[in-house]
Every structure is written in C-alpha cells, then in structure tokens.
Image (tube, coloured by chain):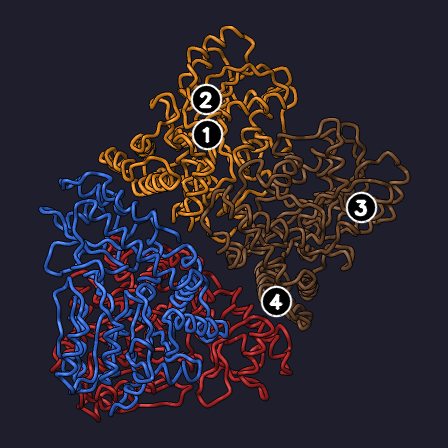
Chain colours: A brown, B red, C blue, D orange
C-alpha cells in the first residue's frame, strides 16, 4: 500500500477510465471530454473564472504563472511558511521580479495581519505569491483572508494550491485568488502530469498588458486562451490518457459532493492526529487549527530516523510513505488523501507505523494509536 | 474493502492479466496457456497426478466427482464436520450411493481413529468423501492421515479442498487423495468459474470401470481425458478469461513459494485469532490446532447479531464480510486469503470490526484487537 | 485479428467493464447487477418469459434442457440441418428420450411443412428440438414458423440459439419457443462462460411435472427458479466477471437498438457473401435466404485445403479464423459478429483472405472481393 | 478505428501496461523502471549518447532545445521542407537567435549540397535545426548526410525526429546528431505526454558553456542532468503512467527488432502508396525515395475537399483520419504507424477511403486501391 503525498493509488474507477484506448486529440469525442473536464474543474474550484488545463506537472503551472505575470522589476510579496513557499522565490527571481519575503517558522501559518502590514509598508508590491497547503509541513495558510487583503491593495495573487484543491475549500472570486495552480495527483487522486489553473480576469489582464506577453511557449498560459478558450483547439498535443483520468476524478469528487469531500478529509486528518498522539507522538504543526487535511507531519520518537522508519515499512511490510521533508526536524509524514481517506486505510497505516516503530525499538504500546483514531472515527458518516 | 470468503479482491496483476482481449479457444496461444496453467496447477497441488480444469464453479467439480465415480448401491463413508460435509450426502444419494455418516460437532475436526474404526466396521465401503477445510466453520480436517488410512482399506477418496488448496498443504500421492476438487477463488485469489481437479490413477480407474462410464456430459470428467488430455482439444468452449486469471494466480503463488505462501496465511490467521481474543471474543473452533488459515469464525458478543454487524460494516464503512454460516451459533467470519493475507489488510479489518462492534454497543476497548494482532505480526517476514 | 465464431474480440467497453474488481456474489451491488442483466436479457430475447443465466458455457444450458425436460421414453422430434442439430440426439438419448430425426442436407434449412407432416405422423411427440443457426453451416432455420406449428400440436420446443440471439430476430411468445439457450460469446460479443436461457411457462411446467424433477444439480434449471427467481440468492457461486461482461454487452446491444443491431449484421453478411463471390468463390448455403448473419461458410477454391488457408492466415498475417467444420465438403468460414460486424473489419478480413489465397496459388484477382463487398456497403448506415 | 498521425491506438499490451496502479515516483520500483526505460530508449536511438525523458509533449523538448542552446545573437541555419521546419524559426527567434533559412517546396527534401553551400557561405553559423520527418508532408530529409556535413563545420545540430524515431533509422554518433527530440506517440505507438531527447557531449557542452545556462525551469534539460543523471532523482514529479506506457512500447519495439520494425513500416508505406495509386490518386511527395514510412500524404480527387472526406469517414464509418495539413494543396493523409502498420489495418483503411470517396462522387473503381496494396503486401514477412 502506498500512503504517499502523490501520486497515490487511484480508485478502481479512475484506473479503468484512464485505461481507455487513446483517441486522436482532434477527435470530436475528445474535444467534448476536454470541455466537460474543464467545466467540472471550474465546479471543483467553486468558480466562474476560466480554468486552463496545462499539459505537464503542476510545477509547469507554477513556473508559467511567474513567467506570464512577472516582468523585470516587478515587486512580489512572497509568503513563506514552508519549503514550497521558499522555492517560489526562485521563479520570481528567474523572471526578473524582486521578492520581498514574509516568513514564519515552518510549523506555523502566515498571519493575515502581517500581510496587511507588509502591503502598507511596500506600496510598490504588484503580486503576492503564497502556498495554500505546504505539503512538507502539513500546514495550511488562511489564503482567503490574505487574498481579500491583497485585493484591497490591488495586488494580483498567485496561489499554489497543489495539495489544496478539493480538500481545503476556497472560493476564488470571494477570496481574491487571481491565479491558482493545482495538480490532479493530490486530493483528486489522479495522475500527476497536468497543471490545473484557475485564472481571474485580473490575472488575464496582467498577462496581456505586459510589454511583451508570453506567447508561443510551453510556459504560455495565453497560448491556451488563444487556442483552446477561443477556438476549441489545442496549442500542442494534450496528454489524452491523463485527461481521461482527470475527467474521471473530477466526476467522482463532484458526485460525492464538494463539502462532503472536504469534511471527510478533515475528519480523517483529525483521526490521524489522534492516532499519532495515541502512539505518544506529537504532530508538527503548532496548532490543530492550521493542520492540513492532506498530510499529517509528525515528530519521530527519539533515536529513530525517518529513513529507518520508511525503510522498515517498505521492506518488511510493503508500505510506502513519502520521504520526510527537509524542514530542520526529525519528522515523518502520513498521508490520507483521495482513496486513502478512509477509516480502513487510515487504521491500516497507523497500525503499520506502530508495528514498524516497535520493530525499531520505540516504546509503542501496540494498538493505542489505532484505538485513538477509531475513537474519532466514531463520527464517520461518509 | 471486501474480506469475504471468495470471490475476493484479485491482485492488480491478476486483474490486468484477466483483462486481456479474448482469443479463440482453438488459437495455438490459448492451447499453450491452458497447458501451462495445467502444469502449474499440478505444482500447486504438489502432485504428478493428472489435473483437470473443468469449466464451471467448484460445485460442478464436486458433483462431477459423485456423478463419475458413484454407481447405484455404492457405499460411501461421508465425513461431516460442517455444512459442506453434510451437503455432500445429497450428491452421494443423487447418484445412487448409500451414505454412511461419520460426524462431529461443527467446531471440531474428524478424528482419523474414528475413520479407521468405521472402515473396519463397514468393509463394503468403496468411497470416502471429506472436506479439507469447511469454510463456514473455519476448521481443517487431518485429511492426510485420513487419506492414508483409506488407502490401507483400498477406499477411493473424494476431497473437497475448495478452501484448502494452496493454503493447507497436502500431497495427493503420499496422502492418499484420489479425487480432489478446488476452486480458484479462495486461497488462489482468482475468479470463481472453474473447478480444479486432481485425479489419481485409482480415481480414473474407478470412473472407467463403471458399468456405464459418464461421457458426453458437462459433468463428465472422462470427457476431459478423452479430449484435452488425449488430444489437446476441449470438450466445449472454455471460459477464456477465467483461464487467464487462473494462470496468473498460479504464477504468483509459485513465484512466492508454496511453503512460504502457506506459512504466510498461517501467521495471518494466528494474528486474526489473537485480534479476536484481544477484543474479548472467542474463536469458534474447539482448538487453534484445527483452525483454518483461510477464515476465522468467531463468536459474537452477547446482544449483537451477525446481520447487525455485517450491515453496519457494509453501510457505514464500506466493508463487506461474508454472511455468517448457519451452524447453530451466533458467529461471524473474518477472511484473510490471497491479497488480504497481509498485515495492513488484517489490521484494517480488525479495526473496522472493533469500530462497528462499538457502534452497536459492545463493550470493546478500541485498539485492543489490533494491538494483539500486531503483537503476533512482529513475526511477519513475507 | 480474430474473425472466429466465438469467443471473439470484445469491444473496448466490454473489456473494461469486465476488468472490474471482483465483488462478493452476495454483495447487494452484485445482486442488483445480476437483476439488471436478467432484465436486459429479457429485452434482448424480446420476451416476458423468465430468463435464467446459468453459470457455464452454452453446452451446459443445452444439456440442462434435455436433463430437466426429457424423461425416459419421451419422444422428441429432432431437426437436423447441421452438426449441432445432429449432436442434440446424444443428449436426447442420454436422458432416456427417443429421438425421431427430421434431417436435410447441411446446406439447406428445415422446411416447416415437413415438421407439420412429422408431427401429424407421430402424435406421441412431446418435445421438438431445433437449432436456430447452425454455426458450422452458416445457415438459419425458420424457427418461428416451426415453433408456431409445434404449438398447434402441444409440443414443447427446445431451441439452440447460441449463434442466433441478438442477430436473428425471434419472439418466443409469438413463435412458440419454450426453452431457448444462447451464449454471450456470439452475436453479443461477450465471454463464453454463461448459458442464457429463456423459459416459457410451458417449459417450467414440463420440468416441474416430471416424476422426479431435476433439483440439486449443476444441470438443474429448477434450482435457479427455487433460489434466484424466488429468493434473489444463487444456487452456487456465479462467475462474477462473466456477469460483468454480459451486463456490458447487453447494454451495448440495447443502446444500439435491437432491430438496428440485426439489420447491421444482415448487411455485413450480405457484403461478405458478395465479397466471396467477388473472389470467385461460392457460399455454402443453398440460398442467400437461409444464410446466417453470423458466419459465412464458403467453398474453397480447388486445390487449397482449409488447413492451408487458416495456417497461412495465422502464421503470416496474424489472422485467426475458426476451423472449417466437418460437413463433408472443403469449406472455410468467415465470421462477422459483434465488434467485427463493421465495414473496416469485414474488408480487412476479405483482403487478407484474398492475399492468403493468392499466396497459396489460387487464381484470385486481388481486390475483387473487397470491391464487391464495398459495393454492398454503400448501403451502410450504422 | 483511428488512422491518425498520433496519438494513435495503443497495442493491447501497451494499454494493459499503462493501466497499472500508480506508484509513488520515489518508490525504488519506479526509479528502476525509469532507468530501464532510459536504457531501452538509448537502444532505440541506436546511441550511447545520454537520453533524457522530459515530462511533457515533444513540443516541450523542441522548445527546450532552443531555450537551452541558443543565446541571443547566435546564428542558426534552419532547414525548412514543411510546416514544422518553418515553425522552428519561432523558437529560434524567441530565444534570441538569428535564423537563416534554407527552404525547399513542401513536397521535396533538403539537398545536403545546399546545406554545405550555406555553411560555407555563413561561417558564423553555430547551430543547425532540421526536421527528420515532416509529418504534414509525409516526407523525410537525409538527416544523416546533413548531420555529417554540419559536423565538418563544427555546427551543433538540433533534430526534430518526433515522427522519425524507430521508423526512419539513424545513428546519432555517426550521423552528427547532437540534440534529437522525439515523442512516444508516433512510431512507438505510446502516449503523447513525454519528450524523448538524445543529447551528445557537444550539445551538453553547448548548454553548459552558455553565459547563463538554463536551470531551475521546466524547460531546462540541464536540470535533468543535475538530478536524474547525477543522482537518480527527479527535478519534478514525472508522469508515472506515461512512463509505464513508454517502457512497454520500447520493450515491444526492441523485442520485434529495430531493423525489422523499420522495414515493416517501409513496406506498409510502399503498399499504401500503391493503394493510393490504385485508386487513381497521386502521393504528394515529389518522389517515393523521400516518402515517409509514417504517413502517406495524397492529392485529393478533383472536387472533393479534405473536410468532406474526413467527415464522411468519421460520421458514416467511424474512421478517424488526421486533418490534412495546410500545405497549400488539397491533400489528405493516411497514417500507418505502430499497431496500424499491419496489412489488415492498411487494407481496411484503403477500403474505407475508397468507399468514402465513392460516396462523395469520385470515380473510384471499388477494390482497385486495396488490390494494388495487396500486390505489394505479397512481400510481407513480419
């Protein structure tokens, strides 16, 4: 079993839908499916903004946002509460922007009041970049509050919601989110090879008003406006099979219900934290209020390294966890998204972590973690 | 998740192998695959006896054994330690045999000494029928000892090993097993639509020496001798896709190693019993020594019915258990075969049973069952 | 490519539907699917008679019909226009019946007037057995007319419609068909491991009024009445994956439209005969009016054997044809059912036959067969 | 059926291999598979140069070549024999290069002597860009001769071999190919979402010696050198399922044999041209010597537009052709790659084109095209 941060196991339905024979991308049936997937993506983003399905992993979308929006000299407020936030500085700089950083320790979330203070102090700020859910830390930022503040200042926002979309609800229009980028391989439980963008009128405007708008490039979001949005044709050959999988995942999430889907993940995450505490371990986030529904990052017991734990799980029990992140502390990550957001999978994961920790000599009382999680799962109704 | 007594979830490899496009059954590639599957089935039966893959569920094979062997007036010693043993009497009678029953309570196993006594007392006994593992009860009979005794008396044995093959080791030659019938949907983790027969020379002889050997019928085992074994053609169109799945399962079991496969199931079953006891419940079999590696039948807590437990698991948690058997006591069954014979699946099953029992008001201390199972699983090495 | 008489290639949709993970046969979802498949099967049979989906290849259903209906001494009029008709005599005799044969040469169809004459001449006839479409010959009998005559005489009819159902329209109620047996692996394009029965009240009555109705056997149709029809449970474990495939095929046929489906096969068969004639070859049936929509049986050119042709096609071009039947003449068979009933596949098949015949030295003018077929296919509208 | 220029139908084996459950990209099993796929890609490229599997459609790889190699002011000789050649000028200019064009009419191939003349005349030329097989035209350039000339002049070559790899043999080392870019969805018969690069030491050198080598971008080839090639980790999450499909396709091509695979496509293309001529139509390439093995571009009969032909084929017969290219003439394209490079599929395609042309009123004698193709296919031996 694989309890990683994505790609993770697809549901049987997604697997089968993805396994369809390839059709030519200009076949009317494919055009129609792409259109349907686009509309469902809008629904999952809870938006009427246009969406764009770029044809490579989410990192392409994140880079494209910088490449299409930022011109040399533009000042960008970059919010840093984890490694992905820090990384975005590289894109800002690559495309000529000047990054102003607002950072917090990696077990905390950004305080919207600090954002307001920064925007007041630096009236030249044109863009604000932030991470919705910084996967390595298992923490979530209050992106809605931040986005609404940014809008007051006329600042265009870029949001990495790769591990946020479909699990941590937002509403782009109300929340002042101008260019959001997600991936299908986290909460949606799909394949990794697509970037799921949501683009506000302000973001389109910013791209088009640049001195030299980016066109004719794999990094160009405008190319999709000129071809797909305007003419229902593609700027290049799309990944047909990945679109099959995306359409399938989106259908499943919408059939399940967006609010129910988020609530289900929230409960599973709560049960996972209870499970960790039941084993005597502490979650990494400073408070449960900022803990992610996707991933639970947990302090390791003294004397056991993350490599030891993962190796034991993989080699002895066939269980794959994602590597613990480089965040300056001995932590490991349990993941519980999509197919894995289920009591049976969560208790299996906790049980195997208990077993592996005990194998490695940790003073775990077997069953205590699972028991604590089961207690929370008494509220399961999904 | 499905923790039933079969058909149960196939491994991904079996699923994909089964999903191959159909070929015509007279295509040389299919003939070759059928041949390969037959040889692997021999290996799994640990035998050089001939094997026959009849083209319908195991019940066909069991009826075929009676239909092909038993002539009117033949005396058959029928061993009864559970519902399937009792049922065989119907076939014996349908085909004109006279059944002598040797029965024990359904939580016990047949005593070989009793068999010897019966065979001594009734020298006219021609056949002995027995069940290797009576699935409803979760108990195993000492079929090797019994078979060797039968051979002393020149009695031809018929063995239902539907939920025995690949999990409860025997050796037909040494153990005096003349006609064994298994199904691919239990320990092998395959599809249900085939009967897997192992036929000794004595059994062939008994079929052919009958006054009117059964030929030209779907129930005829001899038809397979005349066509497939003699001429590499089929008496009727075989179920191509079921053979794909069978060939895949057999490969997987043989690659894993027969002894290792049995040992793995044995440890999982031991952990399951420990888990049940950890929850304060008692296994149904009179002793652990006769407990099945396939299924663990457990007494329910007072005041909770089997229907309630299964309904709660299915409706609230999406967990399917096989219905508890009609064996005159309030019991339920946990199954742990093939793909499900893994610590992650076993602990998931135990955890969900704990949760559902607690939901129904049983005085379960959450996590205790899983903890007890995890303790046993410290010896996992598969 | 496989142009055999079945099993033949499944459509992609059937393949994917069949590839679903197994569920337990007592799972409510499976019960519901089996029920749905049964209702669709009724629709495809164009009947309100009950249908029974027996769990093994159609030969089981055909034998079951004899086993359940015929009592020792019963007189059965057996119509023989091909090998399958002849074969049924064996079942009649095995179950104690007395067969009266009405035969025609294997390139002709039964004349209903002859049936009437026989029924008049032999007032003791209780059953009439006939083959709807005798696959080896590629001919169709006027089963509707025959059935209506049988009804006049109070004779219960048994019809082998294995390669008739869904391609050669009939209506059991109007046409006096009492017990029909089909398979999913011919016109329906499914897997071979099921028998699809349609049972009239008169047939049920005949089974139940026997001195000793057949129950408790894999051959018992009444077992299905007592369990599935009465209580929505199964007499034994059904072949879950085969039912998936059946449900998928039936859906596809019904969505396509029953009349359209038959018309499409009729046109393809007409084009195939034109193609054969275009190559200078003669169809085997005495007239086009009795030619099957499933299979076109064709005389071979002088000097070329059927083995040579099939071997050349298989080894050089990867094309599989079903072996030519033993009907006393040098013929071969082209098949065009289900997925293969399409102009692209038909022309491919004809082209490859042309090429192979030329390779073997036949005086074929390449392209003439395909051209003649294409001429007919100008009327394609499916 | 789909006879498009890619993505086209995958073989059943590729389909099933692609349908495997996703694993985490850092799972050792995936690392090993990626490594294996890389080695097989080298074998298919017939090279010891390093290969890079970039994670988006081939257009990414083509842009990446320009982005990584070309610095502002660099002079690039761009060879233009079709639309893709012409398009490359845009990338040259986007990354600051100065393009010198050597063009021929779109039904001709580049003359190596002209290349030599241009290189002599413009000693400042640093790079040469060319298209191996310009898919819209169905023509092939003598890239080996051109590459060897370029090497004499110390010019680094960029080659678009998207529809060349595995069908039109070259050898990068001998042929002076420095940076080749292919896609898996043409001759290989895979999914479209990957770029398959082959990078010579000279090309690596040119990338690294730039004033500011491109790093930290989805367009960076050097990122793959720094991560995958140096450390067996990925610069971003790869498209796991697309890699499954690639590994499968490469295995199949290598098992078939590289030379045989190319020869097979060559014969099919020859038969396709014969088929077109048999229908009275003329291939577009100026000579058969420069005709592609992937695609046959053909002049339409007078009075019939390409849209009409494709619409008829798609709507009436379910046959999908790729849209005819904008090359200033009324042409259409037949494609015959990978799975479709088989006599049965080719004759089916030709037959359906004949039928559709006749439907539209063209004076086609039905069967003549197929007959002419069958004549050539007498040499089939694959």
- Residue B63 in sight: yes
Compute the Cα span from label 2 to label 1. 9 Å
Q: Is residue A152 above or below residue C185?
A: above
The residue labelled by disc 2 is: D106
Residue at point 52% right, 69% down?
A: B376
Of D66 and A370, nearer the camera is: D66
The numbered dot on residue B169 is none
Q: Is residue A282 shown left or right of residue D113? A: right
The residue labelled by disc 1 is: D136
Q: Do the CB atoms of the residues marked 2 and 1 lie less than 8 Å apart? A: yes
Compute the Cα span from label 1 to label 4. 54 Å
Of D330 and B109, nearer the camera is: D330
Chain designation of label 4: A
- How many tags in the picture? 4
Which is in the foreground here, disc 4 or disc 3? Answer: 4
Q: Residue B126: percent from the left, percent from the top?
A: 19, 85
The residue labelled by disc 4 is: A343
Residue at point 55% right, 86% down?
A: B305
Q: Is residue C307 shown left or right of residue D190? A: left
- Residue D246 in sight: no
Compute the Cα span from label 4 to label 3. 33 Å
Chain designation of label 2: D
- Do tags 1 and 4 sit on the same chain? no
Q: Is residue B132 shown left or right of residue A237? A: left
Chain designation of label 3: A
Which is in the foreground here, disc 3 or disc 1? Answer: 1
Question: Within 10 angstroms of label 1, few (less than 14), some, or many (20 or more) residues?
Answer: many
Q: Is residue A330 above or below residue C143?
A: above
């Amino acid at each position: 079993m694989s309890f990683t941060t994505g790609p993770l196991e697809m549901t049987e339905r997604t697997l089968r839908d993805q396994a369809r024979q390839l059709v030519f991308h200009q076949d009317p049936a494919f055009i129609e499916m792409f259109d349907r997937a686009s509309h469902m993506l809008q629904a999952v983003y809870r938006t009427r903004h246009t969406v764009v399905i770029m044809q490579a992993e989410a990192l392409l979308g994140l880079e494209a946002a910088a490449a299409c929006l930022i011109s040399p000299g533009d000042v960008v407020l970059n919010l840093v509460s984890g490694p992905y936030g820090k990384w975005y500085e590289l894109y800002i700089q690559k495309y000529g922007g000047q990054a102003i950083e607002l950072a917090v320790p990696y077990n905390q979330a950004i305080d919207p009041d600090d954002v307001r203070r920064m925007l007041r102090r630096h009236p030249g700020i044109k863009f604000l970049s932030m991470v919705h859910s910084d996967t390595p830390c298992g923490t979530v930022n209050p992106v809605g509050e931040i986005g609404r503040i940014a809008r007051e200042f006329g600042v265009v926002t870029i949001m990495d919601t790769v591990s946020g979309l479909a699990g941590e609800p937002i509403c782009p229009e109300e929340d002042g989110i101008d260019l959001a980028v997600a991936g299908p391989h986290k909460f949606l439980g799909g394949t990794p090879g697509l970037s799921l963008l949501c683009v506000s009128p302000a973001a389109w405007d910013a791209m088009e008003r640049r001195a030299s708008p980016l066109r004719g490039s794999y990094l160009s979001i405008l190319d999709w406006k000129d071809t797909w949005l305007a003419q229902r044709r593609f700027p290049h050959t799309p990944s047909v099979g990945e679109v099959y999988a995306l359409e399938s995942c989106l259908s499943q999430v919408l059939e399940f219900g967006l609010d129910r889907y988020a609530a289900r993940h929230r409960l599973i995450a709560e049960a996972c934290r209870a499970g960790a505490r039941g084993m005597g371990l502490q979650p990494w986030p400073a408070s449960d209020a900022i803990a992610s529904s996707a991933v639970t990052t947990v302090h390791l017991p003294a004397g056991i390294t993350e490599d030891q734990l993962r190796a034991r799980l993989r080699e002895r029990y066939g269980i794959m966890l994602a590597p613990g992140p480089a965040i300056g502390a001995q932590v490991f990550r349990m993941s519980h998204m999509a197919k894995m957001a289920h009591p049976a999978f969560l208790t299996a994961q906790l049980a195997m972590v208990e077993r592996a920790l005990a194998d490695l000599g940790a003073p775990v009382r077997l069953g205590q973690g699972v028991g604590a999680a089961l207690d929370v799962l008494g509220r399961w109704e999904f």
